[in-house]
Image (cartoon, rainbow, N blue to C red):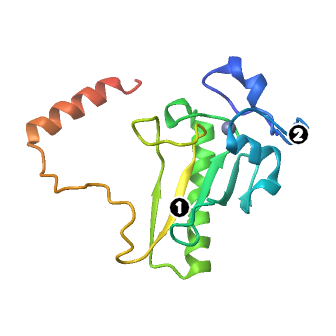
C-alpha cells in the first residue's frame, strides 16, 4: 500500500503500512489496529486500500457498523485530506448497502473526538447506526435548546473563519 501523505511525516514510517503487510500480529494497544493486523477479530463488511468497515460488537440496533482509515490517526484533528477523503468517500456506499440489506428507513452517522466528545477508541472511526422510530438511541439534546441570538452566531462564526487556514 502506498504511503498516504501525512500531516506528521515523522510518524509515517511507523504507521503508513498496512499492519498485515508488516507481518505483525500486535501493532500497538489500539483495538482497531489489532483488527487491521488480524481480520478474523472482526466481522468485515468492506475493505479497500485505505479503509476497513466492520460490525460494531455492540448492536444496539442490528447493523451498527464502523468505518475506519487503515492509517492509525487518532482524531479528525489529526487527519490529512487524503485520509479524510478516502474515509468519507466510502461512507455513502456502506450506508446504501446497510440500508438495502436491512431494509432501513433511518440511519444515524456520527464520529466522536476526544474524551469530552466521548471517543472510546483512539483511532478515527465513523459509526453507521440503523435507526427505527422510537428506538430511544442517540438523544443529542437532553433538554430543549433555544436558538442563539444572531449576534452571537456571527461572533462565533467570525472566530472560526479566522482560524481556518488561508
Ligand atoms: Zn489504530
Identity of the residue drawn at 26% across and 54% down: 141
Residue 21's disc is 2
| 73 shown above or below 95 | above
| 146 shown above or below 70 | below
Q: Quadrant of residue 82?
A: top right
Residue 128's disc is 1
Q: Quadrant of the C terminus?
A: top left
Residue 140's disc is none
Of helix, strand and loop, which one carries label 1? strand
From the viewer's side, name the closer residue of 84 and 28: 28
Q: Is residue 132 left or right of residue 26?
A: left
- Which mark is first along the chain, 2 or 1? 2
Q: CA distance from mark 1 to mark 2?
A: 28 Å
The x, y position of residue 14, in whole percent, is: 77, 25
Q: How many marks?
A: 2
Count neighbours of disc 1 (C-alpha within 10 A) and say few if under 14, some if 14 to 19, many if 20 or more. many
| 39 shown above or below 17 | below
The x, y position of residue 111, in whole percent, is: 48, 48
Identity of the residue drawn at 45% across and 35% down: 115
Ligand 1 shown in quarter: top right
Identity of the residue drawn at 59% across and 53% down: 89
From the viewer's side, name the closer residue of 31 and 112: 31
The x, y position of residue 101, in whole percent, is: 62, 79
Q: Is mark 2 within 8 Å of ligand 1?
A: no
Identity of the residue drawn at 49% across and 42% down: 119
User: Looking at this rendering, what residue extends furthest in the right direction?
Assistant: 23
Count neighbours of disc 2 (C-alpha within 10 A) and say few if under 14, some if 14 to 19, many if 20 or more. few
Of helix, strand and loop, which one carries label 2? loop
Amino acid at each position: 500500500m502506498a504511503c498516504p501523505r501525512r500531516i506528521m511525516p515523522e510518524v509515517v514510517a511507523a504507521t503508513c503500512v498496512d499492519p498485515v503487510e508488516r507481518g505483525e500480529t500486535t501493532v500497538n494497544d489500539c483495538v482497531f489496529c489489532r483488527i487491521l493486523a488480524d481480520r478474523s477479530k472482526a466481522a468485515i463488511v468492506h475493505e479497500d486500500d485505505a479503509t476497513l468497515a466492520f460490525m460494531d460488537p455492540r448492536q444496539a440496533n442490528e447493523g451498527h457498523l464502523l468505518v475506519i482509515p487503515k492509517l492509525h490517526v487518532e482524531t479528525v484533528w489529526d487527519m490529512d485530506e487524503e485520509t479524510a477523503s478516502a474515509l468519507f468517500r466510502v461512507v455513502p456506499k456502506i450506508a446504501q448497502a446497510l440500508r438495502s440489506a436491512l431494509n432501513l428507513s433511518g440511519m444515524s452517522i456520527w464520529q466522536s473526538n476526544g474524551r469530552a466528545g466521548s471517543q472510546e477508541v483512539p483511532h478515527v472511526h465513523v459509526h453507521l447506526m440503523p435507526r427505527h422510530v422510537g428506538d430511544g438511541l442517540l438523544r443529542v439534546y437532553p433538554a430543549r435548546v433555544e436558538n442563539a441570538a444572531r449576534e452571537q452566531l456571527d461572533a462565533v462564526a467570525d472566530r472560526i473563519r479566522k482560524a481556518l487556514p488561508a
